[in-house]
Amino acid sequence: SARAGDRTAIASFERAAQALAAGIAATATLVEIDIAVIGGGVAGAGDVLFVPLRRALRDYATLSFVQQLKVAPALMGNDAGLVGAAAAASLGEPDGAAAGVSS
């Protein structure tokens, strides 16, 4: 609907992009990342999400070391999480540390 120009749908994506940008900027500030990769079905939204997300990110990522932060869709789409989990599991950490599991 947003791609077809529905104002309510567009406003929903812009609001979601703003919230996502706030979270990404806060995380980037804490851990100093250069890129945030969005995966899963959300990445399939394309420009309907990424254009307002990048615009909102400029408002939230104001510190010098996060101003060049990039946001991109995961190349693996819906499979990104599964591939990441499999890669973490293949590291063979016996305590689950590689998969982010804490005791």
Image (cartoon, helix red, strand yellow):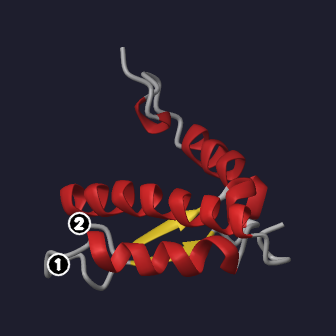
Of the numbered discs 1 and 2, the one sitting upstream in the chain is: 2
Place of residue 79 in the rendered image (x, y in percent of width and height, measured from the top left): 76, 54
The residue most toward the front is 7
Secondary element type, mark 2:
loop
Q: Nearer the viewer, residue 58 or 38?
A: 58
Q: Nearer the viewer, residue 19 or 42?
A: 19
Q: Which residue is mark 1?
A: 65
* Residue positioned 52% across, 43% down in the render: 91
What is the CA distance from the residue labelled 1 to the residue labelled 2?
7 Å
Q: In the rendered structure, are the residues bearing label 1 and label 2 in contact, judged by CB atoms less than 8 Å apart?
A: yes
Q: Residues within 10 Å of mark 1 (few under 14, many from 20)?
A: few
Secondary element type, mark 1:
loop
* Residue positioned 24% across, 76% down in the render: 66
Looking at the rendering, which quadrant does residue 13 occupy?
A: bottom right
63 lies above or below 91:
below
Place of residue 35 in the rendered image (x, y in percent of width and height, measured from the top left): 41, 73
The residue most toward the top is 103
Looking at the rendering, which quadrant does residue 18 occupy?
A: bottom left
Q: Is residue 52 left or right of residue 7?
A: left
Place of residue 85 in the rendered image (x, y in percent of width and height, measured from the top left): 62, 42
Place of residue 76 in the rendered image (x, y in percent of width and height, measured from the top left): 74, 65
Q: Residues within 10 Å of mark 2 (few under 14, many from 20)?
A: few
Q: Is residue 26 left or right of residue 7?
A: left
Q: Which mark is residue 77?
A: none
- The type of residue carrying mark 2 is Glu
- The type of residue carrying mark 1 is Phe
Q: Which mark is residue 32?
A: 2
